[in-house]
Image (cartoon, rainbow, N blue to C red):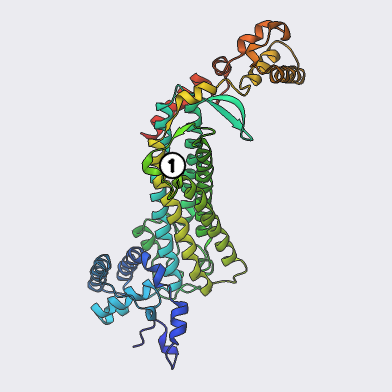
């Protein structure tokens, strides 16, 4: 028999250049566990409906376990002539079992087989990433607790804006990564729909039981339209979109900490183990992990664009273009997985330079908005209060002083000076979700309970 899964139709062999051009074993071999998992469920179902004997099904299941062990041990010899991991495993099965192995592909196509394997892999990838993001959240929450008493300048446009508690700052990232986890959980619902049984595109005339396979592989439901199945890569695009947002959040955090670690800011003491030096400048301590995290975001977003362009304009049902989905999907996941894995310990080991921060915390008019709101609370219209405080800030700039240093007679109501200073500004906050100390303590408690 032909070594190809489709060789009977052809009278001649495949040009070696075509084999090299069309192979996917170089990247889809990582699906071997998922291919074996899907094939074992399929074999047991075939026995249930009478297409295999129970003995044949168990022979196939055991042989597939042995093949998986061989792959684990590095004993599988990969050949581009066999195209992909699915053919490699099937040929190894036939070598072990002969005609019994040739029966495994009954009632399925590589089209529905491939997308099933890819969904099984994506489901595992989502679960792994969720676990890593949980650890990253714990790192931010632990930092929030460790630095809970520190007051930071909050920024908009990279200009000093209002004071915030350091705990409030760290918990902001816990929130971002919580949204990422929720997006991944929602994406998982659409991943967890069984494609197997759609066959090539129209289903099969054989008496397969798709519900049986669904239960064996722990899918939530069965894909309803066979024509849609083999062309559907929505789940891959959605997953890489979720990965892109994770990467974007990591990139923003990395950018912030690169800036904060400069001499000009000097807010952070990055751990030596996560930095590198210079080959010529002996004093340098470079935040390379943060910079690479920022840089790798482009690869992930690029993978999303690659997938969009891949599926744009493809007709139903399967087209070989879709073989190219895996390189983008795998690379996007590997990149984000690596970034998140290194981010958690970096966050845990980074310390705020409390003395440096405290020495300048009163600079930059962080209390100006609180002063304005104190005037509003005394009946001054908001726009009028805004203008009054703006004039006071201009006066401070001319005198080179802080708002609290201005004489009381310059204020519309002398008692509002009690609102000045970052500590008083923090004490004045009261809204839900704000940086008010009591509110931050409440949120910190909720996060500790959620992640314990």
From the viewer's perspective, is residue 105 above or below residue 360?
below
Quadrant occupied by the N terminus: bottom left
In depth, the one of 45 and 105 nearer the eye is 105
In percent of the image, x 37 and y 63: which residue is there? Answer: 213
Lateral position of residue 136 relative to residue 376, left or right: left
Q: Is residue 104 visible?
A: no
Q: Which residue is mark 1?
A: 285
> Where on the picture, by quarter, is residue 211?
bottom left
In percent of the image, x 49 and y 55: which residue is there? Answer: 190
x, y percent for residue 79: 35, 78
In percent of the image, x 52 and y 45: which residue is there? Answer: 251
Quadrant occupied by the C terminus: top left
The crowding category of the residue bearing disc 1, from other C-alpha atoms within 10 Å (few below 14, some 14 to 19, many at least 20), is: some
From the viewer's perspective, is residue 436 above or below residue 191?
above
From the viewer's perspective, is residue 157 above or below residue 277?
above
In depth, the one of 264 and 11 nearer the eye is 264
> Where on the picture, by quarter, is residue 14?
bottom left
x, y percent for residue 217: 36, 59
Disc 1, SS: loop
């Amino acid at each position: 028999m032909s070594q190809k899964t489709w060789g009977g139709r052809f009278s001649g062999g495949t040009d070696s250049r075509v084999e090299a051009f069309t192979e996917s074993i170089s990247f889809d071999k990582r699906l071997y566990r998922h291919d074996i998992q899907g094939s074992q469920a399929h074999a047991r179902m075939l026995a249930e409906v009478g297409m295999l004997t129970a003995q044949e099904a168990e022979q196939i299941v055991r042989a597939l376990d042995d093949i998986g062990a061989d792959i684990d041990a590095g004993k599988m010899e990969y050949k581009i002539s066999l195209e992909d991991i699915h053919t490699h495993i099937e040929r190894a099965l036939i070598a072990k079992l002969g005609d019994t192995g040739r029966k495994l592909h009954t009632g399925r196509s590589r089209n529905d087989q491939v997308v099933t394997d890819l969904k099984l892999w994506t489901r595992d990838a989502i679960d792994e990433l969720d676990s890593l993001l949980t650890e990253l959240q714990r790192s931010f929450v632990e930092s929030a607790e460790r630095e809970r008493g520190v007051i930071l300048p909050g920024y908009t446009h990279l200009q000093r804006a209002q004071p915030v508690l350091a705990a409030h700052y760290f918990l902001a990232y816990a929130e971002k990564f919580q949204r990422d986890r929720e997006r991944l959980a929602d994406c998982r619902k659409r991943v967890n729909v069984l494609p197997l049984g759609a066959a090539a595109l129209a289903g099969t005339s054989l008496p397969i039981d798709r519900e049986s396979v669904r239960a064996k592989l722990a899918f939530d439901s069965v894909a309803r339209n066979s024509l849609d199945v083999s062309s559907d890569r929505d789940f891959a695009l959605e997953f890489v979109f979720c990965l892109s947002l994770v990467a974007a959040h990591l990139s923003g955090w990395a950018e912030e900490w690169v800036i904060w670690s400069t001499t000009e800011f000097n807010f952070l003491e990055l751990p030596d183990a996560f930095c590198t030096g210079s080959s010529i400048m002996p004093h340098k301590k470079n935040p390379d992990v943060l910079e690479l995290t920022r840089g790798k975001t482009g690869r992930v977003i690029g993978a999303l664009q690659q997938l969009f362009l891949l599926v744009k304009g493809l007709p139903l049902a399967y087209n070989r273009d879709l073989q190219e989905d895996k390189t983008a999907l795998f690379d996007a996941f590997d990149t984000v997985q690596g970034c998140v894995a290194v981010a958690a310990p970096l966050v845990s080991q980074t310390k705020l330079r409390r003395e440096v921060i405290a020495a300048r915390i009163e600079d930059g008019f962080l209390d100006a908005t609180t002063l304005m709101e104190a005037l509003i609370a005394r009946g001054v219209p908001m726009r009028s209060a805004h203008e009054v405080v703006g004039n006071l800030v201009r006066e401070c700039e001319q005198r080179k002083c802080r708002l609290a240093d201005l004489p009381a007679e310059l204020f519309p109501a002398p008692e509002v000076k009690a609102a000045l200073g970052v500590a008083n500004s923090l004490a004045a906050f009261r809204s839900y979700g704000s940086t008010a100390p009591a509110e931050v303590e409440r949120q910190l408690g909720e996060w500790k309970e959620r992640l314990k």
